[in-house]
Image (cartoon, grey):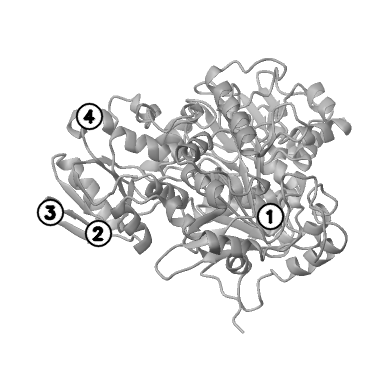
Amino acid sequence: MEPVRIIEGTAAPLDRSDVDTDQIIPSEWLKRVERTGFGEGLFSDWRADPAFVLNQPQYEGASILVAGTNFGTGSSREHAVWALTDYGFRAVVSPRFADIFRTNSTKAGLLPVQVDEVTGRALLDAVAADPTITVAIDVEARALRAPAAGIDTTFPLDDFTRWRLLEGLDDIGLTLRHQDAIAAYEATRPPWLPITTGPSRPITRF
Amino acid sequence: MTTQTMSEKVWDRHVVHAVEGEPDLLYIDLHLIHEVTTPQAFDGLRMNGRTVRRPDLTVATMDHNVPTVGLDLPIADPISARQIDALRRNCAEFGIRLYPMGHIRQGIVHVIGPDLGLTQPGMTIVCGDSHTSTHGAFGALAFGIGTSEVEHVLATQTVRQARPQAMAVTVDGDLPPGVTAKDVILAIIGRIGTGGGVGHIIEYRGSTIGALSMEGRMTICNMSIEGGARAGMVQADDTTFAHLEGRPHAPRGAAWEAALDDWRALATDEGATFDKEVTVDASRLRPHVSWGTNPSHVVPIDATVPEPADEAARRALAYMGLQGGTPLRDIAVDAVFIGSCTNSRLEDLRAAAAVVAGRKVNAGVRAMVVPGSMQVRADAEAEGIDRVFLDAGFEWRAAGCSMCLGMNPDILRPGERCASTSNRNFEGRQGRGGRTHLVSPAVAAATAVAGRFTTPEDLP
């Protein structure tokens, strides 16, 4: 993963709540076996409408998506994150994110920026009124700033995830440093727990 | 002594490494995988020279994009075929047991785990699928993950997760006749909304839940994610143990007895506190039907389509082609789908078959039954349920996710309206422009006969 430190650019307003991952990337796109090329499918049903925000030239090149509350609900498909990043978004701002979408985002280098309802509304209105407004997100400071809209706020991000994003660290590599702890845990698991490779586990002791 | 909820107990048992300010590193007892959310994860392993730590705790099947007819023919869609081939090759390369198309144990991943007895109380279970919450019906902690996490579990048999909060949904009272587990969960989601459970594990409690079958509990836990919850759980009890005993992977003999003692100790302690609590009076519930484009858009079948309260509701009604004030019972359907990880088990098929027996599907309605697994299909056929559906004019298909998410050829045409026993009524979920109404198997069956939304009691 590339390090994510400062995200600065223009923003596109998606003034809808409960944007589910089926809308972000419809299921017909999920048959691909690659991680790339999903940008074309981003919001593909909604983009069929010429009035949709991403079809408006003034939002071309936006790197931040500002959405209504409850963004990324539904399916666990990480393809939704890949579609947003492949299209060019580096952060999504919303008053609430679905749990799985939030986790998927930080694993794939897309920053979920959770703000309060009032700030979210103010930012949506500001970028709808003036598409040229610059929004800056500072991962280290956990801060979102849009001076032209009078917004200067912080957002939640746990220390570990922040460090991982700042350094661009591989999550699996970090966990493999705990291999000894994993092996020690495995030795304590109850003997009746199932294994998938046999019809049933031979019981030798309890 | 401090008191704990069931989810806290199961969580604590699986912590491998915990540090303040970091998400916990949690051990995973069972990793279910399927063709759609894994190819990129296996590629990641190969790219980094990594392997699968515990193939013996991993099991694979094909469900999301598989066709449900013509199983003897090559898959017509070359992109789907490539994905299916990738799973087959990946499982062979890494030594993972696969239940492929054509196998009696193939089916929806959340149907086959419990079928095989792989789903047991107190376990941690993950899958690259949000409906993994289904397995919580057994008192397991089960949740959906994305592909990066799938790769992480394959490589390390752990996930990194922040500890969720505990939420109690208590359902008390006797269910009125004709009201099912599906109606209970639709009513709950209508109450709490699609984000009401975010950051929480829901524990379903109360006399109504205790009286439900395992199938009914699975239906409820399955849709926890539609209320935004990380997972849903039901305390394991004698119903759970009777369902599990004797299944292929269930413990036997002395191990079974030891496991029972352990599982009973997982119950939420008396006096344990929840971060959030909701109570539902089951005795006042009616069969529910969704009217909009997310699963919180639900009303009792006797109600009318609500007048839109905001822009989101106006958009939903426009998409659904509905007017506020229309009685639900006046809405005609083009299709009926009985299936999905929510409602495709033997009990669901029996309930629907009891309604259609001796009746005919309404002219102009396309009706389809897709059993959750090939084993469920075989069990149903042994009871003659396939004949009941076929005689009524239903299609009787092979197992898979099918029209729940429209990844295979089973889709709605634009504008078509469907009564569906599945879990999501999102725009385009069952095919671009398709209109989905979520219902129970009994209401779906009655609606197939009447051609418009109705309950079994109201059929002539």
Q: Which residue is at the far left? A: A148
Q: Work out whether A92 lies above or below A37.
A: below
Q: Work out whether A38 lies above or below B228.
A: above
Amino acid marked by disc 3? Pro
State left or right for residue A39 relative to residue B407: left
Number of callouts in the render? Answer: 4
Q: Work out whether B236 lies above or below B367.
A: below
Which residue is denoted by mark 1 in the rendering? B137
Q: Are marks 1 and 4 on the same chain?
A: no
Amino acid marked by disc 1? Ala
Q: Disc 1 sits on a residue from what chain? A: B
In this rendered view, identify the residue nearer to me: B200 or B365. Answer: B200
Q: Of the residues tagged 3 and 2, which is closer to the observer?
A: 2
Q: Residue at x 49, y 29 (%)?
A: A33
Q: Secondary structure at mark 2?
A: loop
Q: Is residue B168 visible?
A: no
Image position, residue B369 (x, y; %): 71, 29
